[in-house]
Amino acid sequence: MKVLFIGKKDDFYCEKAKEFTLANFPDCNVVMCRRGDSVPEIFKDWAGDYIFNYLAQWVIPPGLLKRARIAAINFHPGPPEYPGIGCTNYAVYEKARKYGVTCHHMDSVIDSGKIIAVKRFDVFDSDSVFTITQRAYVFLLACYFEIISMIVSGAPLPQTNEAWTRRALKRSELEALCRVSLDMSPGEVLARIKSTTYPNMPGVWLDVDGRRYRLVEDDN
């Protein structure tokens, strides 16, 4: 079988997924990316059996998806309740008690294709965007190993009655969540800080007289 693996560059879990794919599919093209990278040339003419998209930062062109003869499969680090960008952020903001990851067929609309499998886990009061995200990455890799193992062994892909519950969240909506204003309640400001705080990410900001200030929660 001919496979195209599309993944996130410099990511530990993605490297493990890539290694597993290369070990099981000798005829495999690998493309790794960061957000903002140009779309690679191979997208223009690749054709084969499967596309596996694992945490990649690109929107995969519909023409490329159609050239996957058997399936184009995405591994999304959020459950069907949170498609799109900022899935963990919104789960924290909405005080979700469950989170998870989703494996699904890809189509021209982001995070809308038929769902293959979902793995869920509990969310605790002590959790943060970081801890939930890290747990999701572990579950996503386990899901990847499970689904790819089925394909390698010739087993049919599973089917589920799970369905997406909303349209995919956009980056502009996540950026709006990062904005606070002086007329917001203290509770709303703290909720936005908690739901957008992540290592090496900017977090929330406040615009005062045309100047932008970053806010952090005081642990004391």
Image (spheres, helix red, strand yellow):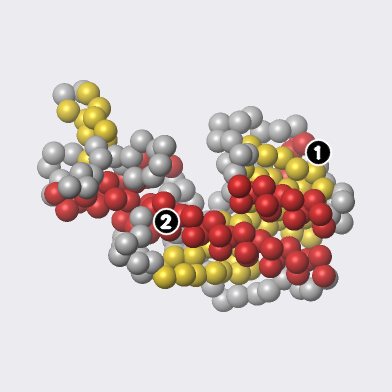
Q: Secondary structure at mark 2?
A: helix
Along the viewing direction, whichever of 188 and 171 lies nearer the viewer: 188
Residue 177: assigned label: none
Of labels 1 and 2, the one closer to you? 2
**Number of numbered markers:** 2
- The residue lying at 56 percent from left, 51 percent from top is 110
Horizontal relation, residue 29 to residue 219: left or right: right
Q: Residues within 10 Å of mark 2 (few under 14, many from 20)?
A: some
Marking on residue 45? 1
Most extreme residue toward the top is 210
Residue 123 in the image: state x and y as whole percent.
38, 66
Which amino acid type corresponds to the residue marked 1 in the rendered image?
Asp
Residue that appears at 61% across and 69% down: 117
> Residue 48: x and y, percent?
83, 50
Please determine whether, in this image, residue 82 is positioned above or below residue 190.
below
Give the number of the disc on residue 131: 2
The image quarter in which residue 212 lies: top left
Q: Is residue 20 left or right of residue 162?
A: right
Q: In the picture provided, is 56 more to the left or to the right than 187?
A: right
Real-space Cα distance between discs 1 and 2? 39 Å
Q: Amino acid at mark 2?
A: Thr
Circle nearer the N terminus (1, 2): 1
Which residue occupies 76% across, 73% down? 156
Relative vertical location of residue 117 with respect to residue 87 in this rendering, above or below: below
Q: Is there CB contact under 8 Å for labels 1 and 2? A: no
10 Å neighbourhood of mark 1: few (<14), some, or many (≥20)? few
SS at circle 1: helix
Quadrant showing the N terminus: bottom right
Quarter of the view holding residue 146: bottom right
In the rendered image, is residue 165 in sight?
Answer: no
